[in-house]
Image: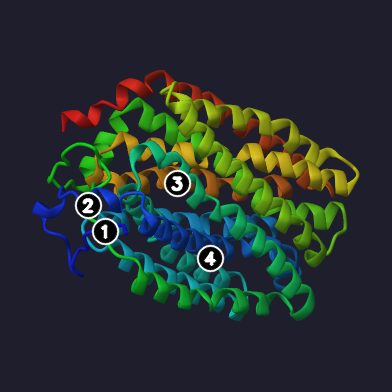
Amino acid sequence: MPQPPVVQQEHPQPTSALGVSGPASAVGGPYAYYVLGVLFVVYIFNFIDRQILAILLQPIKEDLKISDTALGFLTGFAFAVFYTFAGLPLARLADRWVRRSLIAISIAIWSVMTATSGLARGFTDLALVRIGVGIGEAGATPPAHSLLSDYFPPEKRATVLALYACGVPVGVGIGYWLGGWINDTYGWRMAFFVIGLPGVAMALIVRLTIREPVRGMSEHQPVSTHTYSMGEVWRFFAALPAGRHISLAAAFIAFAGYGLAAWLPAFFVRIHHMTPGELGLWMSWISAIGGTLGSFSGGTIADRWGRRQPRARVYVSLIGALLAIPFLALTVLLADRRLALLSFLPANVFGTLWFGPAASIVQDLVPPAMRAVASAVFIFILTIIGLGAGPQVIGILNDWIGTPDAIRYSLLYVAVAMNLLSAWFFWLTGKTLVTDLQAKRQL
């Protein structure tokens, strides 16, 4: 039987304990996979609550009389700004405090805020609850990345973080299906109630069943006991060309991804005249199967190829960004709605290959005591540019073009331009990655 991991006390960990190694058998053992499974479900809840608004945009627009620019704000900056700015101090807390407790509190907050969305009477109410959802969700992913990096060895990191990232397409898919079905049957307000409240039970599961590992126990070398300020992490990460470039590469591909995730349902409702319930059924399995296959394949291929090629994680991400472009174009240009929807399946596969490799590069570039904050810095850049600007820019373009099919061309321009920019920055990441991976040894 594997030995249980060393457990931290329920208070901030002393500096001297930061580098204590846990038992070798706890790394990558059965309990580690249990933690991965629980955090995967947490990420599903995260994206169900985050993305349900997309499938409900059109009924909310018609009910509350909101413009596309305002809807773009609700799906973009209203969430993204507070998500990213709250994420930095919460990640700093995660590098000092008990990560599983922070995750549990965060789940409870965003779940209650999602349910409260069903009470909104207008744009201002929706904006305020979206801000609450953003603040709650800010406390989940950086500590989750840090926990998983302690429970699994570096050579499995891209695969593990890719498996965790599979919660994105699964959550988006469930949100599309469940949100669309509830909307058609009971209305958009009930969809928020039904989807938001079960997250409170998930918060209890995290708090009561996940044990806190010793930081750095998966490393094969002694871990520094030094703790770092947020400014030190920012300066170290920003000083690495690979750190800057991987963040921008992820931000631009997320710009396209989040923009399409927010507006593609409205595109099919407006252009192909589908109901949210009918569309939700299609989008659910396309998003879940395509995104899960892409994310898992990206991490697995990157780790296996990485045994021979140190830049494999960058190359997998770059190839995915380029191969997604023709299928995204077909999705918005084809006149047959079934063919258009089916084209979105390979677009999802290729467009999610980067999830695990990019996140693992960030974790590899920094020492264990910086991991949660480094993840938050990465997510800050990705979210402000991707989640914040992506939906907002498409909403503005829709209103600016002003034609009945404006949304088709807004989606096309954004998808092609942002994926090309992303591929360029992935290539720049590869140029300095091998050298930059050695920088943490100087600390």
Question: Residue lying farthest right?
Answer: 336
Disc 1, SS: loop
Q: Are marks 4 and 2 in contact (CB under 8 Å)?
A: no
Residue 418 in the image, given as x and y percentages of width and height: 60, 34
Q: Amino acid at mark 1?
A: Gln
Residue 3 numbered mark, or none: 1
- Residue in the image at 44% along x and 39% along y: 158
Q: Nearer the viewer, mark 3 or mark 2?
A: 2
* Residue 21 in sight from this viewpoint: yes
Tell me if 40 is positioned left or right of 403 in this view.
left
Alpha-carbon distance for marks 2 and 1?
7 Å
| Chain-order first, disc 4 or disc 2 | 2
Alpha-carbon distance for marks 3 and 2?
22 Å
Alpha-carbon distance for marks 3 and 4?
17 Å
Residue at mark 3: 161
Residue at mark 2: 23
| Chain-order first, disc 3 or disc 1 | 1
Residue 100 in the image, given as x and y percentages of width and height: 33, 65
In the picture, residue 82 is in which quadrant?
A: bottom left
